Amino acid sequence: MTTMNTEERNQYVQEMESAKTKYYEQHNKNRFFKNSQKLDCATNISQQMDIQKMIQCTVFQIPNTNILYYNYLVFKTYANDQVTPILYQYVVALVDKVLKEYSSFEFHVNLKSFTISAAQRYYNIICSVFDENTSFTGKMTKLVIYHTPSVISNIRQLLYNSIKDIVDKVEYCYKDSDAKIAKLFDISS
């Protein structure tokens, strides 16, 4: 499993953002039917760019730790049903890689801008990761959610059947998420 370094990830995220900007320059933003346009934009980007690189920018291991970091802001740029199997396989392989070196792992998730409509839009992707991978429930010691959405109780209720076994492992960060994320990346230096 090849991995990108921080500089490579940052550069590729910029390329993804440029593709998104270009899409919206060619397609006026809808006031209505936003979800379908977001999905069309994401599909367009996922077809133009290297899906493996986009996934590596979305979820990765913090170097020299048992911590996996997932960035929703990157994910939403290309997320659609076609990427679900590829993302799922990558996450499973990444968890397995970490568990070869450590007996457990932590999963840290940046949910900045995540909404109830996003939870509905990505319901299948979220559920497949938790429903089909027992490593998440058995070997995960902590799930930290940064930029915890104000509607987290609604989201938790929507996803309850898939996340019920990990609810007691979840830590919610409502304040100072950016500083806590920066500190998380400092521990690997």
Image (spheres, rainbow, N blue to C red):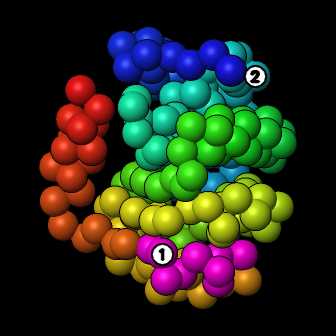
The N terminus - image quarter: top right
Foreground: 74 or 45?
74
Report the span colored magenta.
Answer: 162-170
Please report the residue visible at 61 percent of the width from the left and 61 percent of the height from the top.
139
**Residue 79 percent coordinates (x, y):** 66, 42
**Residue 127 percent coordinates (x, y):** 74, 66
The type of residue carrying mark 2 is Gln
Residue 182 within the magenta-colored segment of the rendering: no
Residue 165 within the magenta-colored segment of the rendering: yes
Label 1: element kind:
helix
Mark in front: 2 vs 1: 1
Q: Which residue bears the numbered disc 1? A: 169
Residue 47's label in the rendered image is 2
| Disc 2 to disc 1, C-alpha distance | 36 Å
Question: Who comes first in sequence, dot 2 or dot 1?
Answer: 2
Foreground: 5 or 176?
5
**Residue 88 percent coordinates (x, y):** 76, 45
Please report the residue visible at 39 percent of the width from the left and 31 percent of the height from the top.
64
